[in-house]
Amino acid sequence: MTARSQSNGHPISFKDGAWRHTDGKPVEPRPCRHCGKPEVHMELVIPANLSHTGKAYRKPVGIDACIAPLVKALNDGGIATIASCCGHGDQPGNIALADGRELIILPDFEAARAMDAMLLPRWPRRLWNWIKAEATMWAVLLGRPTSSAVWIDKEQSNAH
């Protein structure tokens, strides 16, 4: 049986004890199949809970060039990342955070709105309206209107 995967968007397979590209060459860093840029190497902290030693340590890792600035900014800001992929033009990109959350990276505004349309109908409209009302109430009580409270107020004034 042959295991299959990808390396920077290039198909690879595990056969006879080694990972190889489909052209038979051993797996080595190749440019991203989508953007053509090579991996960016940066040193990241591997958290203790994901470490084979049970202790946090720093490790050089290859990051897809087109999302490397996002990964760096998150880690520099104290938000540890554990995995990432730009999607190589085949699927949305993602950045997995050490706390279990995952960021999905879509190629443009239209793709993000399409994903919103798929997810939003799953929220009961009554619950969504309650959440917006609670946000407005807390913003008014705290005397600090947030951008969402201003947006909600505008939405309500347009409805009348």
Image (spheres, grey):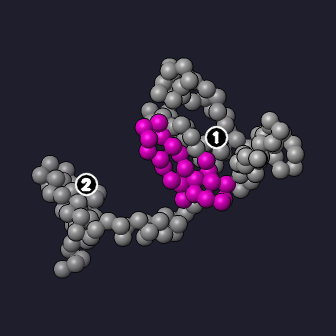
Residue segment shown in magenta: 85-106
Residue type, mark 2 in image: Thr
Specify which label sits upstream in the sequence, 2 or 1. Answer: 1
Q: Residue at the location (76% across, 51% down)?
A: 11
Task: Find numbered disc 2 in the image and state the secondary structure of the residue it sits on.
Answer: loop
User: Residue 87, relative to residue 158: is it above or below?
Assistant: above
Q: Report the Cα–Cα distance between label 2 and label 1.
A: 35 Å
- Left or right of 145 on screen, residue 45: right
Instruction: Say which residue label 2 marks.
Output: 146
**Three-letter amino acid code at disc 1?**
Ile
Dot 1 falls on a residue whose secondary structure is strand
Which residue corresponds to mark 1?
63
- Front one among 69 and 107: 107
Q: Could you say where residue 126 lies in the image, as x and y percent from the top left?
A: 22, 69
- Compared to residue 93, the image places residue 77 above or below, namely above
Residue shown at the point (22%, 78%) measured from the top left: 159
